[in-house]
Image (cartoon, grey):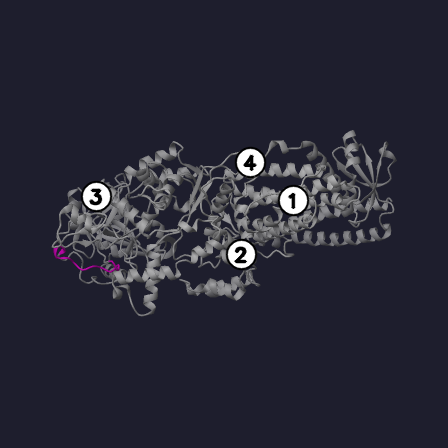
Amino acid sequence: MLDKNYDPQTLEKNRYRLWEENGYFVPADQSGSTRADGAGGGAYCIMIPPPNVTGSLHMGHGFNNTIMDTMVRYHRMNGDRTLWQPGTDHAGIATQMVVERQLEAAGQTRHDLGRDAFTDRVWEWKQESGGNITRQLRRLGSSLDWQHERFTMDEGLSNAVREVFVRLFEEGLIYRGKRLVNWDPALHTAVSDLEVISEEESGHMWDIRYPLALPPGAAGPAHLVVSTTRPETLLADCAVAVNPEDPRYKHLIGEFVELPLTGRRIPVIADEHADPEFGTGCVKITPAHDFNDHQVWLRHRDENAIAEQPHGGLINILTPDAAIRDNQPEDGALLPAAYVGLDRYEARKLIVADLDSLGLLAAVKEHRLQQPRGDRSGAVIEPYLTDQWYVRVAPLAEPAIAAVEDGRIRFVPDNWKNTYYDWMRNIQDWCISRQIWWGHRIPAWYDVEGNVYVGRSEQEVRERHGFGSDVVLLQDPDVLDTWFSSALWPFSTLGWPEQTDRLNTFYPTSVLVTGFDIIFFWVARMIMMGLKFMGDVPFKDVYIHGLVRDAHGDKMSKSKGNVLDPIDLIDGIELEALVEKRTKGMMQPHLAEKIAKQTRKDYPDGIPGFGTDALRFTFAALATTGRDVKFDLGRIEGYRNFCNKLWNASRYVLMNTEDQDCGQQGGALELSAADRWIRARLNATTATVTDAIEGYRFDLAAQAIYDFTWNAFCDWYLELSKPVLTGTSASDAAKRGTRRTLVETLETLLRLTHPITPFITEEIWQKVAPLAGVQGETIMLAPYPVADAGVDDPEAVSEIEWVQQVILGVRRIKGEMNIAPGKPLPVLIANASEQDKTWLAIARPYLDFLARIESVTLLEDESSAPESAIALVGTMKLLIPMAGLIDKDAELKRLDKEIGRLTDEIARIGQKLSNPSFVDKAPPAVVDKERARLAEQSTAIGNLQAQREKIAAL
């Protein structure tokens, strides 16, 4: 027997340990399908999007992993050889920052240790503290093949990374060049677009006068006015652009302006980048410090007025720290000495002051701007000109586009393919180098003259080029972008470049499950690399899910104080611990007090522990096709109640079947209409759930399971079973048939539900399966239910639906008449068809037991019926005489009191709504709520008055 109370925390930890110890997560070498219909038996594989080794489980992980585990458990039960490949990402920047902070606390930097010792320190940290996220994934019930866990810096994956780099370089698809990148001046490295967060901030717009250098006697304005949010960058300007169709400036194209503070002259050029409708229509062009300006420079760099400038107009003015750099020997006095060495913001202040003193500052305006900041450092990102390694992406993108166009890869929902196409058809070369120490070091070496040699190792380079030990080679200090190794994940984790059994079995993988925010950074790159190095797509389906937001639709973030930790939802957390968690280590400490106050208001008692299954069922129920997933704590509470309902229903089944004859040893079985009905309903639910999971509609699967379990099985069938099991008139064969139906229905329901709620289903199944005659060590490897058209039973379904309507009709009348639910009542039947009469005869045990019917009388003439309450079942009428059922005087007195209360309430609301100051000043939602209450109360008073008239006529 199950414990009296459902305790998810205890059973979940024990069950997972047993699953993992018994090796149930490892792909079985299955020789055939376990399904009754013979389907399945193929290979099925999902690659986990590797979480950062530094990370902790967040709601996005919980949602994503619930979907993947549901698919994996479903296919494992279907007899497929199923692999869910686990692993973590080395997370170059994030991991390096964690260890650097530890060193900083000890008064050291990584430079004090040196590169090798620092890298060793990171490996030590990874061994000691890097397993937090994998422990949390276990708490979530994720059935990953932990025996084959990978890490993007392990030896095998590192070999794969070097192999890909070398091959791409040898084909001319990797090159080194000087380009603009997103530069983090705090971390001293290039970062990807995904690692840049742009948020609106308050700043300023400076309007600056650039004096025109017109020939003597030429007509024209004294200056052009340009607007900028970064006045310090004017030191790097190479031109002022105007639109070629702008009549204000058309005649000035080809002329020059004096670049303030520098003594340089720069040309006025024509380019459509300049928008005549924006600002003055004049745009300063700073190609080494602005991505858009760089594109303008590329279009004009061969023009003499640009090409003859220092560095061909591509002038970098910053150091890696974002300070104004010193002049190089070839620069002369390119950068004014007054600004050299100043931080960019100090230089800005001085430049603005100098412009003002020269009368060149036209205006300063407050301005809201999108400020790009590094997601790790919080530093303002600078477009920065550096030597970096790049992948030439266009040749790789073309076959990757074709793979989606011809259907070899399918996006679900389908509309996401348009997002993919849009990016792929406008793709830029990929910057793959990072100026940090933790990561895959670029396999390139330089001689003393700066010549570069690429190879799998220094030894290979020396052997290939005939270099002896006297030739000094230094390896490139940069490491590869973390996304480079992630792009190889679908095949590197399976053993590539070796041709392993796992690679041959599980590549291409079946589906990638991910959020829409990394379609560009990860999905597209995996497709390109898979096609390039495996000659096939890396996955057949890409299921794109929404992003988890809070109940109001806001993004969860520490600065908003609305973050929920999945583990806290599973285990619970006390209020003070929750407040500390939400306010500790904030980048904006001044928000801590506000967040603490809001947290205490929202969770005065902390967060209770709901258990993993309730959380997973919530995620599944929320997995619609939309962009956003709004997570409401009320939903998880409802699904915790669902788990509790299933637990208590299972206890009822076990109490009535354990140590009882359930037909395991044979014997005649007599199935009632209710037995046949619940089997048909379960069969229909099985078909719905299967179709939903196959179609990635986990919300529909969860809804179908919920509706069947709560309504059909618990609320109806268990009650309909009681007259058979407890009645004296039921035969042994009927009792045996109902017991058999109880255990078989529950056992099948547990298998149907297992992929979404693995723990509770396993716990109950271990008790129920033997009673249902089902063998097996674990529900994980039991066959998934298969719908069988032969189980459909329209006659039983029609009969029980009729029974339900009769019972609900009687219950509704009792409720309206304020009659105790358990009071037996006589029922008169009018306008009954022959089918109604048949069902009345055979369904009396159900009606007597569940509707508490005292007697049933068929009326030939409805007009002879006394004053009665009426309910309709199709065309048949249920009449319950009211005389003698109630204390007429007491009921009239009660109704009068209730009518009086509602009359006063309606008057109060009406007065409120007739007050213009309330209607005009109150929020619309408040006014609408009052109007809805007025309509609701008016309907209620009408019903009560009708009821009073009926009772008064008795």
Of marks 3 and 4, the one in the foreground: 4
Q: Residues within 10 Å of mark 4 (few under 14, many from 20)?
A: few
Of the numbered discs 1 and 2, the one sitting upstream in the chain is: 2
Measure the C-alpha gap from mark 1 to mark 3. 89 Å
The answer to whether the residue labelled 1 contacts the one labelled 3, judged by CB atoms less than 8 Å apart, is: no
Of marks 1 and 3, the one in the foreground: 1
Of the numbered discs 1 and 4, the one sitting upstream in the chain is: 4
Residue type at mark 4: give it. Answer: Ala
For the point 34% across and 40% down, which residue is it?
530
> Is 550 on the left-hand or right-hand side of 3?
left
Secondary structure at badge 1 equals helix
Q: Which mark is residue 14?
A: 2
Q: Residues within 10 Å of mark 1 (few under 14, many from 20)?
A: many
**Residue at which label 1 appears:** 743
For the point 61% across and 36% down, which residue is it?
684
Q: Residues within 10 Å of mark 2 (few under 14, many from 20)?
A: few
Quadrant in the picture for residue 472: bottom left
Measure the C-alpha gap from mark 4 to mark 2. 31 Å
Residue type at mark 1: give it. Answer: Val
Q: Position of residue 574 (x, y in %)?
A: 54, 64
Of the numbered discs 1 and 3, the one sitting upstream in the chain is: 3
Of the numbered discs 2 and 3, the one sitting upstream in the chain is: 2
The answer to whether the residue labelled 2 contacts the one labelled 3, judged by CB atoms less than 8 Å apart, is: no
**Residue at which label 3 appears:** 252
The answer to whether the residue labelled 3 contacts the one labelled 4, judged by CB atoms less than 8 Å apart, is: no
Residue lying furthest bottom in this view? 107
The magenta segment? 320-331
**Residue at which label 4 appears:** 36
